[in-house]
Image (cartoon, helix red, strand yellow):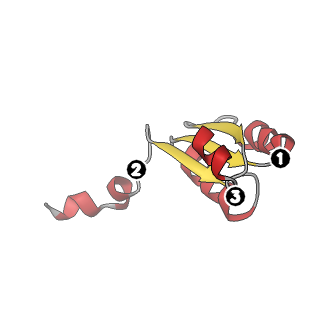
Amino acid sequence: MSNSNFQLSEVFDVKGKVALVTGGGSGIGLMATQALATNGAKVYIVGRTEEKLKTVQQTYGKDISGEIIPIVGDVTKKSEIEKL
């Protein structure tokens, strides 16, 4: 493996990747969502509040190379995790 494989553009290239971010409606989860989607990832955000998730999608999902897709769910409940 050569040093060129460790260039930032290679190491952190998320274009075309798929991510699942829990708590994507606020805080660190929101920042992760923005970073991934802005750089070309398809990001599924999971949270308990549909309105908050849709607001994130509408606010930060415009004019980016990736995509933000909200999923309502409570990851503290095993039955809801199984639905994901």
Depth check: 46 or 37 in front? Answer: 46
Q: Residues within 10 Å of mark 2 (few under 14, many from 20)?
A: some
Task: Tell me where residue 23 sits by quadrant.
Answer: bottom right
Are circles 2 and 1 on residues that touch, CB within 8 Å? no
Depth check: 80 or 61 in front? Answer: 80
Expressed as whole percent of the image width and height from the top left, the position of residue 11 reads 35, 58
Instruction: Looking at the image, tell me whether mark 2 or mark 1 is earlier in sequence order.
Output: 2
In the image, residue 29 sits, relative to residue 84, either above or below, namely below
- Going 72% across and 45% down the picture, which residue do you hit? 73
Kindly identify the amino acid type of the residue bearing the numbered disc 2: Asp
Are circles 1 and 3 on residues that touch, CB within 8 Å? no
Q: Residues within 10 Å of mark 1 (few under 14, many from 20)?
A: some
Label placed on residue 59: none
Any part of residue 71 in sight: yes
Expressed as whole percent of the image width and height from the top left, the position of residue 37 reads 58, 44
- Going 58% across and 43% down the picture, which residue do you hit? 82
Expressed as whole percent of the image width and height from the top left, the position of residue 54 reads 79, 38
Q: Quadrant of the N terminus?
A: bottom left
Q: Which residue is mark 2?
A: 13
- Going 70% across and 35% down the picture, which residue do you hit? 62
Task: Tell me where residue 2 sits by quadrant.
Answer: bottom left
Kindly identify the amino acid type of the residue bearing the numbered disc 3: Thr
Kindly identify the amino acid type of the residue bearing the numbered disc 1: Thr
Q: Which secondary structure lies at badge 2? A: loop
Please state which of the two labelled residues, at mark 2 or mark 1, is closer to the viewer: 1
Q: Which residue is mark 1?
A: 49
Q: Which secondary structure lies at badge 3? A: loop
Label placed on residue 76: 3
